[in-house]
Amino acid sequence: MYYEIAGLKVSMNPKHQPLIDQVIPYQVQYIPKIIDCAIPQGEAAISRYQKKKPELSLGEAEYLLYGVYFYDALLEHQGIFLHASCIVYDGFAYLFSAPCGTGKSTHTSLWRKIFPTSFILNDDKPAIRYQEGKLFAYGTPFSGKTNQNVNTKVPIAGIAFIKRGLENSIRKLLAKETLVLFLEQTLQPYHEQRLDQMTVLLEIIIANIPIYELTCNMEDEAALTAYQAMKPKF
């Protein structure tokens, strides 16, 4: 079967949940002339991957393994995964990244409450791609346990790395502060060529997208603090 994910044409044939359901919105009803990402088929590869990580079910192993295959192709096409919850409001994407358990999804749920027309583009691994001189966020089926994702692309207004705190504050980060934060919240490629491609793309992102440190609590004011600082200034 064929899919379009983050603008890439993908061939794959998932056999297990949750991926079977999560890829449905990305399926296309035609045979692409060019395949950007051909994910190998077969239960053997999934079983081998699961044996390395016995805590996973077959479905979880498939989900993670197929995500790794896709990420390799994404890097080749000036794209990257960021471990983040991405929300869209007024036509722009806002990405909130942090280690698991910090409160990314809780924070974007405050946006959904305060800004009813906003929606979650992806709640775990949105793709960021550099296309025609602009940076876009894409929904992907690799959206974590919540299965919140939308198959569309949106220009990025800003990225914030979240810290928990009693008070709400936000500051723009210097370029030299951001690289380590990105590397902590994205997948690390094994091959030197892909690592070089990731490094070049991160430099583009850091140079062209406002990046912030958001210290926040879990009250409504946290979303307002973030939005007022991160919204585009025309």
Image (cartoon, grey):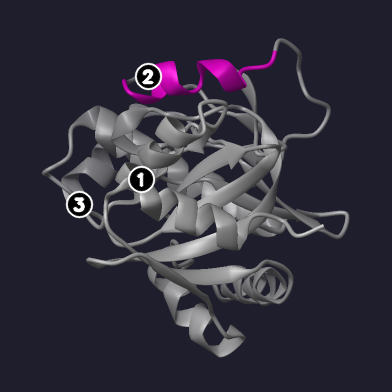
| Residue bearing the label numbered 1 | 220
Given contact means CB atoms under 8 Å apart, are the residues at marks 1 and 3 in contact?
Answer: no
Classify 10 Å Cα crowding around label 2: few (below 14), some (14-19), many (20 and above): some
Residue furthest bottom in the image: 176
Residue furthest left in the image: 55
The boundaries of the magenta stretch are 17-28
Residue 45: x, y in percent? 35, 39
Query: Is residue 84 visible in this depiction of the protein?
Result: no
Residue furthest right in the image: 132
Could you say which disc has been placed on residue 15 in the image? 2
Residue 27 is inside the magenta segment: yes
Picture layout, residue 189 above or below residue 64: below
Gap in Å between the C-alphas at discs 2 and 3? Answer: 19 Å
Q: Secondary structure at mark 1?
A: helix
Residue 17: x, y in percent? 31, 20
| Residue bearing the label numbered 3 | 52
Residue 226 is inside the magenta segment: no
Q: Amino acid at mark 3?
A: Lys
Q: As drawn, is 97 to the left or to the right of 115?
A: left
Gap in Å between the C-alphas at discs 2 and 1? Answer: 41 Å
Label tally = 3
Please name which of the two marks, 1 or 3, marks the residue nearer to the observer. Answer: 1
Q: Amino acid at mark 2?
A: Lys
Q: Secondary structure at mark 2?
A: loop
Residue occupying the point 42% across, 55% down: 83
Query: Is residue 20 visible in this depiction of the protein?
Result: yes
Gap in Å between the C-alphas at discs 1 and 3? Answer: 42 Å
Q: Secondary structure at mark 3?
A: helix
Q: Amino acid at mark 1?
A: Asp
Classify 10 Å Cα crowding around label 3: few (below 14), some (14-19), many (20 and above): few
Classify 10 Å Cα crowding around label 1: few (below 14), some (14-19), many (20 and above): some
